Each structure stands twice: as structure tokens, then as C-alpha cells.
Amino acid sequence: MSEKQFDAVKMMREIRDRLSNQFRDMNFEEQKQYIRERIHVKPTKARHLENSARTV
């Protein structure tokens, strides 16, 4: 059996831990802004996504 070269679960946990650390002192609005700035979503699309999330 070969050793796996990429551990997706480990990577997901590392990313989650890093984000949790960065978000520790942010409120929800600040967190949304932080994410928007980094994924380059146009504001109109972001609003659409927020509205969709609220109806679920």
C-alpha cells in the first residue's frame, strides 16, 4: 500500500484553525468583509448569496 501524498482532512483542519485564530476578535460583519476581500466576489453576487443563505 502506498503512502498518501496529500491529506485533505489535515489541510482542512489547518485552514479552519488558522481562520478561527484570525476571526477570534472579529464580529460577523468583519468576518464577511474579510472573506469578500480575499475571494474577490462582486458585491451584487455576495448579496445574492447572502439572501439565498437566509432563505435556507
Image (cartoon, helix red, strand yellow):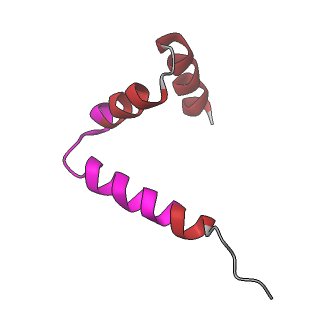
Q: Which region is colored magenta?
A: 12-30
Q: Position of residue 51 (x, y in %)?
A: 55, 23
Please, what is the dominant secondary structure of the magenta stretch? helix
Q: In the picture provided, is 10 more to the left or to the right than 32? A: right
Q: Locate residue 18: give its quadrant.
A: bottom left
Q: Look at 54% across and 31% down and name the residue there.
A: 54
Question: At which x and y percent is residue 55?
Answer: 60, 30
Residue at the extreme top of the image, as rendered: 44
Of residues 28 and 12, the one drawn nearer to the viewer in this rendering = 12
Residue at figure coordinates x 64%, y 67% from the top left: 6
- Quadrant assignment for the N terminus: bottom right
Q: Position of residue 35 (x, y in %)?
A: 41, 34
Q: In the displayed structure, does residue 11 sit left or right of residue 56?
A: left
Residue under the image location 38 percent in, 26 percent down: 37
- Residue farthest to the left? 25
- Would you say 38 lies left or right of 42 here? left
The image quadrant that residue 27 belongs to is: top left
**Residue sticking out furthest to the right:** 1
Above/below status of 38 relative to 19: above
Which residue is located at x 36 percent, y 52 percent? 19
- Does the magenta run of residues contain 32? no
Quarter that holds the C terminus = top right
Could you say which is closer to the camera, residue 6 or residue 17? 6
